[in-house]
């Protein structure tokens, strides 16, 4: 698994990942900042990373902080109103700057049901 990128490479990787994921972004999770990738630098926008989940403060189970600290992938489900999102947080280095690449996909009913219509996913979540 690759985690060391140059700025142009991570920009290209993000564009490719956007073909699969609903949200792909770089974050600096300690400061809770979402990165803006410019032509030759990385800046930060005015939104905190937790704003995407309609939260006023850091997620209690912030997998991006864990990914940064442990330098490995973490996953979780995030619930916003009536929607479910699957989140992958991956440690990356971009020009020696340690960040986290977040990839998010909205979980639809099509994902939840098996071919025979049985909703094993929900049963397992309830049992957990």
Image (tube, rainbow, N blue to C red):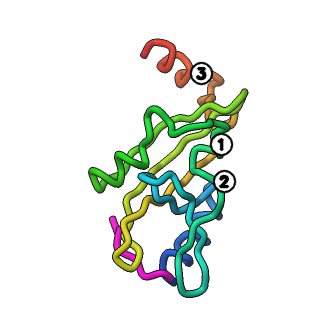
Residue mark closest to the camera, 3 vs 2: 2
* Res. 24 image quadrant: bottom right
Residue at point 46%, 54% (across, down): 31
Are the residues tagged 3 and 2 within 8 Å (C-beta)?
A: no
Q: Residue furthest top?
A: 127
Which residue is the site of mark 3? 119
Q: Is residue 5 magenta?
A: yes
Query: Regarding mark 2 in the picture, which secondary structure is present there?
Result: loop
Which residue is the site of mark 1? 106
Of 3 and 100, nearer the camera is 100
Q: Residue furthest right?
A: 82
Q: Is residue 22 left or right of residue 76?
A: right
Q: Is residue 58 left or right of residue 55?
A: left
Are the residues tagged 1 and 2 within 8 Å (C-beta)?
A: yes
Which residue is the site of mark 2? 22
Location of the C terminus by quadrant is: top left
Magenta range: 1-7
35 shown above or below 124: below
Q: How many marks?
A: 3
Mark 3 and mark 2 lie on one chain; the one further toward the N terminus is: 2
Q: Is residue 57 magenta?
A: no
Where's residue 116, x and y in %? Answer: 62, 25
75 shown above or below 115: below
Separation of residues labelled 1 and 2 (CA atoms): 7 Å
Residue at point 60%, 70% (across, down): 36
Label 2 neighbourhood size at 10 Å, few (<14), some (14-19), many (20+)? few
């Amino acid at each position: 698994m690759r985690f060391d990128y140059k700025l142009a490479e991570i920009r290209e990787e993000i564009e490719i990942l956007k073909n699969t994921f609903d949200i792909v972004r770089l974050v600096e999770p300690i400061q809770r900042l979402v990165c803006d990738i410019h032509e030759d630098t990385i800046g930060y926008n005015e939104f905190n990373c937790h704003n995407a989940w309609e939260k006023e403060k850091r997620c209690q189970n912030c997998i991006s902080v864990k990914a940064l600290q442990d330098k490995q992938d973490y996953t979780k489900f995030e619930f916003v109103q009536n929607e479910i999102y699957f989140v992958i947080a991956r440690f990356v280095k971009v020009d020696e700057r340690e960040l986290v690449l977040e990839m998010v996909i909205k979980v639809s009913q099509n994902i939840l049901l098996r071919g025979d219509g049985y909703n094993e996913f929900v049963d397992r979540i309830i049992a957990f």
